[in-house]
Image: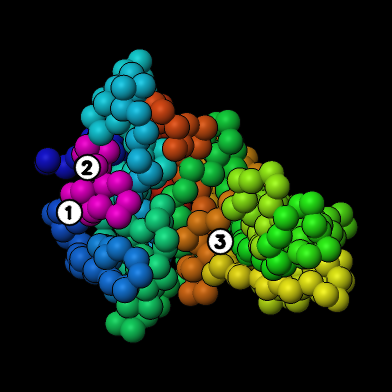
């Protein structure tokens, strides 16, 4: 592929079946393109006993400060029932001005646009441009960006600013930049009782009423009212289960799974304390229970300032749109990057991500490349 443009790179990446945790040739394809453009390219695998091995990529051109990094992922979610796609999910077909394929908007299209922009910009006269690309964003995120950042830091890389190419836009390219994300904390509340016959409840200890009292206490009072930059924190019950399929048996155990999306009024530790206190108060002194916590994601906010203004101005110049600076939505690998440098997220429109017939307008891929190019031009001016 000689001097490929953004759309051609996107097609090449989509044709790689990189369903998490498979690399599928996507990192090899991107690495080859960047190497041909003069980048120093490293393939960096990581392993963990409890999760799949993951391949990652770090590439850079130039040296010293300022160091601008583009971060993203080439892994994609499974395509689902392939028979329901109008075009093969790994074809990279173009029809009626749209590019089809799994990862078109989340987020191989953005990676292609950035590669195209970076190659057009060339080597900075001063400073560094780098790519921090993982194959583990759609998976458990154990052997991906978190470890790759540490690897780069230990090599002496110091990042100054970052854009993550997540599909941030709601309706039209340029309408939203993510400058932060709420944190995420999940847990399972387990109440234990004593199994018995429903006709003889005095010989048993039903954990269900105690669990329901605890669940009610967790959700009946709002966690907060939100802040200037963030929506209100919310706790959602996602599952209630006893494992009991018999009508005449009091179960020995009842469980409730929940997730909290929280703003900067809280930390994961403060929420663990709050949830425990509410559950204890509501369940009763005789309740035997525990809370099993999952790994958490921190809330973060990149303060409005020169960098966010630079990105917004580049979008306005290239797309004619003034973006909203938002903290809405779920989590991304930006939650790891924020510990190393200020980070924002900006990519394609996300209306079809993870769906059957995932697709993006070809013109959006081209325009996104123009926006990224304007960012680089302003950043290294």
The answer to whether 337 appears left or right of 269 in the picture is left
Q: Nearer the viewer, mark 1 or mark 2?
A: 2
Circle 3 SS class: helix
Circle 1 SS class: helix
Q: Earlier in the sequence, mark 1 or mark 2?
A: 2
Does the segment drawn in magenta span residue 17?
yes
Cβ atoms at labels 1 and 2 below 8 Å apart:
yes
Q: Residue 307 bears which disc, if any? A: 3
The answer to whether 255 appears left or right of 10 in the picture is right
Res 359 seen here: no
Q: Tell me the distance, in whole angstroms, between the alpha carbons under discs 1 and 2.
A: 10 Å
Q: Is residue 95 above or below residue 371?
A: above
Quadrant for the C terminus in the image:
bottom left
Residue position marked by numbered label 1 in the rendering: 28
Circle 2 SS class: loop
Res 330 seen here: yes
Residue position marked by numbered label 2 in the rendering: 16
Q: Tell me the distance, in whole angstroms, between the alpha carbons under discs 2 and 3.
A: 34 Å
How would you rate the neighbour count of disc 1 (Cα within 10 Å): few for under 14, some for 14-19, many for 20 or more? some
Q: Quadrant of residue 180?
A: bottom right
Instruction: Report the front residue among 192 and 30.
Output: 192
Residue 347 placed where, x, y %?
A: 46, 44
Q: Which residues are magenta?
A: 12-29
Q: Tell me the distance, in whole angstroms, between the alpha carbons under discs 3 and 1.
A: 31 Å
How would you rate the neighbour count of disc 2 (Cα within 10 Å): few for under 14, some for 14-19, many for 20 or more? many
Q: Quadrant of residue 268?
A: bottom right
Instruction: Report the front residue among 220 and 355.
Output: 220
């Amino acid at each position: 592929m000689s001097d490929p443009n953004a759309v051609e790179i996107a097609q090449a990446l989509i044709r790689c079946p990189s369903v998490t945790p498979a690399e599928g040739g996507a990192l090899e394809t991107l690495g080859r393109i960047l190497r041909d453009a003069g980048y120093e390219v490293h393939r960096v695998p990581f392993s963990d006993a409890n999760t799949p091995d993951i391949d990652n990529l770090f590439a850079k051109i130039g040296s010293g400060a300022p160091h601008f990094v583009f971060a993203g992922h080439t892994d994609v979610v499974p395509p689902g029932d392939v028979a329901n796609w109008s075009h093969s999910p790994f074809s990279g077909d173009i029809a009626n001005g749209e590019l089809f394929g799994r990862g078109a908007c989340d987020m191989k299209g953005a990676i292609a646009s950035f590669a195209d922009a970076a190659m057009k910009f060339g080597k900075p006269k001063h400073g560094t441009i780098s790519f921090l690309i993982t194959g583990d964003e759609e998976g458990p995120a154990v052997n991906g960006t978190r470890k790759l950042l540490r690897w780069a830091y230990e090599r002496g890389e110091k990042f100054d600013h970052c854009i993550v190419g997540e599909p941030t836009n709601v309706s039209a390219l340029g309408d939203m930049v993510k400058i932060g994300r709420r944190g995420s904390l999940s847990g399972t509340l387990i109440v234990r009782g004593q199994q018995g016959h429903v006709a003889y409840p005095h010989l048993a200890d039903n954990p269900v009423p105690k669990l329901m009292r605890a669940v009610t206490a967790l959700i009946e009072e709002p966690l907060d009212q939100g802040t200037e930059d963030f929506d209100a924190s919310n706790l959602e019950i996602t599952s209630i289960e006893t494992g009991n399929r018999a009508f005449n048996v009091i179960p020995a155990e009842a469980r409730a799974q929940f997730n909290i999306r929280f703003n900067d009024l809280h930390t994961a530790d403060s929420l663990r304390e709050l949830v425990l206190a509410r559950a204890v108060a509501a369940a009763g002194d005789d309740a035997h229970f525990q809370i099993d916590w999952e790994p958490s994601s921190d809330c973060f906010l990149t303060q409005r300032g020169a960098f966010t203004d630079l990105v917004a101005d580049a979008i306005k110049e290239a797309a004619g749109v003034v973006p909203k600076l938002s903290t809405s939505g779920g989590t991304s690998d930006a939650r790891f990057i924020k510990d190393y440098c200020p980070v924002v997220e900006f990519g394609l429109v996300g209306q079809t991500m993870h769906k059957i017939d995932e697709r993006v307008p070809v013109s959006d891929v081209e325009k996104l490349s123009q926006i990224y190019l304007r960012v680089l031009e302003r950043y290294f001016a």
